[in-house]
Amino acid sequence: MLQKISGGEIILLKDDFNRTIKNLRISLTSKCNLRCIYCHAEGEQNPKEEISREDIAEILRVGEKFGITSVKFTGGEPLVRRDLVDIIRSVPESMESSLTTNGTLLAPVARDLKDAGLSRVNISLDTLRPDRYIEITKKDMLANVFEGINAALNVGLTPVKLNVVLLKGINEDEINDFIDFVRNKRNLILQFIELMEFDGNKYRTNVTALEKELQAQSKTIITRRMHHRKKYCLNGSEVEVVRPMHNNEFCAFCNRLRVTSDAKLKPCLLRHDNHVDVRGKRGEELEELFLKAVKLREPYFT
Ligand code: SAM
């Protein structure tokens, strides 16, 4: 499971399925200022005591020791955390940091985040229409999201990825509008996301047909290392598709360890029964818990 790199001090985290962990995804809070009708809230509906800045810094320090090269912060909405800029500052220099946000609160702090070392952002936006935005999020903040996108592009939090979850009967008719929205915009990439199913989620739609259509229209298709996602390049628009459900490639190429907003290592996106509590843990004790969490990793879809 452990692999020493000759001559170096880094010890790589490799799970029993030959997947090397290179990436952390840390949820900073379960709180959010939007109320999206389909949201899985990263499986964290109930607010609990939030992971502390000190715990995050230690997790990052240990992650660096284990050869982790990138970290993504998520939530809830990470921008509701007042100490977000300080958290970004605590990311080791060797790690690339990014953030996924609904973009509504981004514009006023984009510059500070960039100066603190944040590399880029994903901005979640499921519709370009104001009335629909209210229907989906229960808030009238679409204009703030557009400001957030512009601010991110202006200060260089790039490439900016626009996350669009496809929702049956709600936004499927906006696929081409989104492709047009990113067309010929440098550093703006579109990412269509398949809705993850959970009880009562009636908006789920099959994205296989969309992928086939993109495949047919694309001049170039790039396969990314992360989850083996495909990037389609079509006529001035870059489009990725994220398909976590029933997708064994997603699992086979998963190199990510998650951290919940209540300070638990989470070996698999789709499991809630094998978390490893690391609140307050430091040094070797935390390293052992990283190893334990990695040992628990197994592909959900095979
Ligand atoms: N508030 C931040 C944001 O909007 O990006 C971070 C948290 S949000 C849970 C992270 C991403 O998960 C967003 O792009 C959101 O659209 C997506 N998401 C939420 N529920 C989902 C579901 N059931 N299936 C697929 N993606 C989902």
Image (spheres, rainbow, N blue to C red):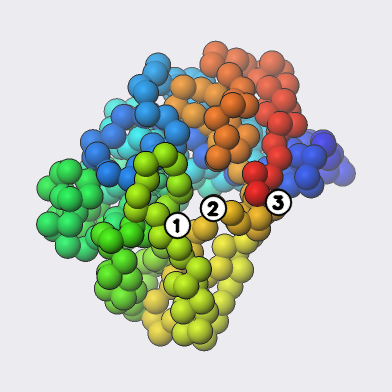
Three-letter amino acid code at disc 1? Glu
Location of residue 283 by image quarter: top right
Mark 1 CB near ligand 1 (8 Å cut): yes
Mark 2 CB near ligand 1 (8 Å cut): yes
State the mark number for residue 194: 1
Going from N to C along the chain, the mark reached first, 3 or 2, is 2
State the mark number for residue 302: 3
Locate residue 109, reporting x and y percent: 26, 42
Disc 1 and disc 3 in contact, CB within 8 angstroms: no
Question: Is any part of residue 150 visible from this angle?
Answer: no
Q: Distance between the residues labelled 2 and 1?
A: 7 Å
Three-letter amino acid code at disc 3? Thr
Label 3 residue SS: loop
Quickly name the residue at label 2: 244
Q: Residue at x 35, y 35 (%)?
A: 76
Label 2 residue SS: loop
Going from N to C along the chain, the mark reached first, 1 or 3, is 1
Question: Is any part of residue 133 visible from this angle?
Answer: yes
Q: Residue at x 66, y 55 (%)?
A: 248
Q: In this picture, is 65 found above or below 111?
A: above
Mark 1 neighbour density, 10 Å: few (under 14) some (14–19) many (20 or more): many
Locate residue 175, reporting x and y percent: 33, 71
